[in-house]
Image (tube, grey):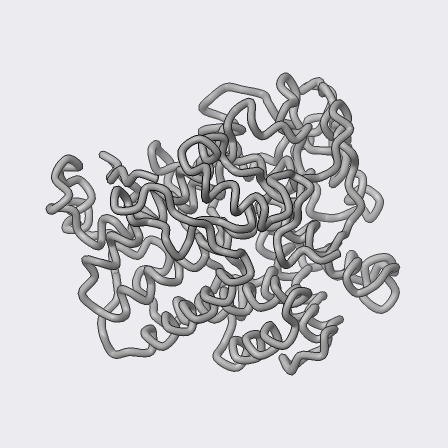
Amino acid sequence: MKKYLVILSSLFIASCASDEALENLNRDPNNPTQVSTEALFTSATKKLFDQMESTNVNTNVYRLFAQYWTETTYTDESNYDLNTRAIPQNHWGTMYRDVLFDLQDAKNLASTDKQKAMISVIEVYAWQQMVDTFGDIPYTEALKGGADPTPAYTDDAAIYTDLLVRINDAIAKLNSSSTGYTSADIIFGGNTAKWKKFANSLKFKIAMRMADANNSAAQAAAQEAVTAGLIASNSDNVILHYQGSTPNTNPLWVDLVQSGRKDFVAANTIVNYMNAQSDPRRPFYFDNNLGANVYTGGPYGDNNSYTSYTHVGTLMLDPTFRGVLLDYAEVEFLLAEAVERGYSVGGTAAGHYTNGITANMTDWGVASADITTYLARTDVAYATATGTWRQKIGYQFWLAMYNRGFEGWCVKRKYDAPAFNTAAISGLPLPNRYTYPLNEPTLNKTNYDAAKTAMGGDAQSTKVFWDKF
């Protein structure tokens, strides 16, 4: 992997950004010595949000994998063809080159412990995302550029163990008296208290993801994170406020509006589930293009007519629609699971489950009366909904991650709920992972072959270490 230093000519600037920050972000990209740690940190953070928010099928197909949306004219991706458009290669390149390399460079230039801690939190998030997508990846020997262009792969479970070490170090540094990023911090504007909640919640998320694979380590880390303080309301959500003009709009607007394309409709998988429970999020998740309160999802993976099925909701067509990396609803569903596992995290599974649904609906703008009505349904209330705790939590967790396709896919893989449709044309089941980029067997063959053997095959059916059921 080769490092290409990319500093966008007109990078996203948060409303709180200063003139100095703007000047730093627009320095000569051909002279890396002039690039500041602030510019690199901002660039990498925005690129991470953009990559996770995008629905461009060349780079991000997570909303399809989560069966929230399905395709119209082109159906390769919803039938789990990853290679025609080199999707793994594009995601791999973006995360290593534009996120992790720039974060590494930012850390090398950072002057305070708190700056390094903020960088580490974003690094840990990005590394976890890559592990959860591919499994074993270059990690210990990665990011060395020309010094090691063919890095070995590291075991995915071992990476998780190290990520806990790294996030603990970041949490300790956030407690230092040094100064962190301010205007360059496009998430919290330098608010250290919110960064601590982010870091603790990320630690908690890592712990809960690995719970089926290493329960004792997961329990210890989860309980430490809860004691230190998690995201406690929607006001703590890890979000990016996009702006109204390019290049600072939400990538969804670029893909769905500016492009003029009509490539997606809501999938019947999620629409049918929500219709069955008269879910009050439907007018927010979806458009009323078929008539008031009429929602019909396109058969997942089929050739769907754009005019015949429900469209994406208008909120998601707004160029300023916020991007999300981690939120309160996610934390509450994980707390519900932790209680069911017997972890000492406080509260009840039912209470956290209810809080997760409420937090998500409130965040989308659902009226409180409608939330109360939904929670009172016997097929929703924790005590009376059918299924095991994994099925109850997994189903509502998946519904809540609607605009976070990657998390929706992870929820399905971990909880094995809800039931998904088989892709209509290919007949293939949901992939358990991305296969490795096509150039790895050519450019890094020895290490690729070793990783392929260690993983049990470079196949979509191969599971990452935490996916035990």
Q: Where is residue 274, by image quadrant?
A: top right
Residue in the picture at 22% in, 54% down:
38
Q: Where is residue 371, by image quadrant?
A: bottom right
The answer, for residue 16, to whether it is visible in the render is no
Rendering coords of residue 127 (x, y %): 45, 54
Q: In the depicted view, which residue is nearer to us: 54 or 411?
A: 411
Residue in the picture at 72% in, 27% down:
301
Rendered-image quadrant of the N terminus: top left
Q: In the depicted view, which residue is nearer to us: 340 or 234?
A: 340
The answer, for residue 329, to whether it is visible in the render is yes
180 up-or-down from 140: above or below: below
Q: In the depicted view, which residue is nearer to us: 273 or 467?
A: 467
226 up-or-down from 369: above or below: below
265 up-or-down from 351: above or below: above
Residue in the picture at 46% in, 64% down:
163
Rendering coords of residue 218 (x, y %): 60, 72
118 up-or-down from 417: above or below: below
Rendering coords of residue 219 (x, y %): 62, 76
Residue in the picture at 44% in, 30% down:
442
Rendered-image quadrant of the C terminus: bottom right
Rendering coords of residue 248 (x, y %): 35, 38
Total number of numbered labels?
0
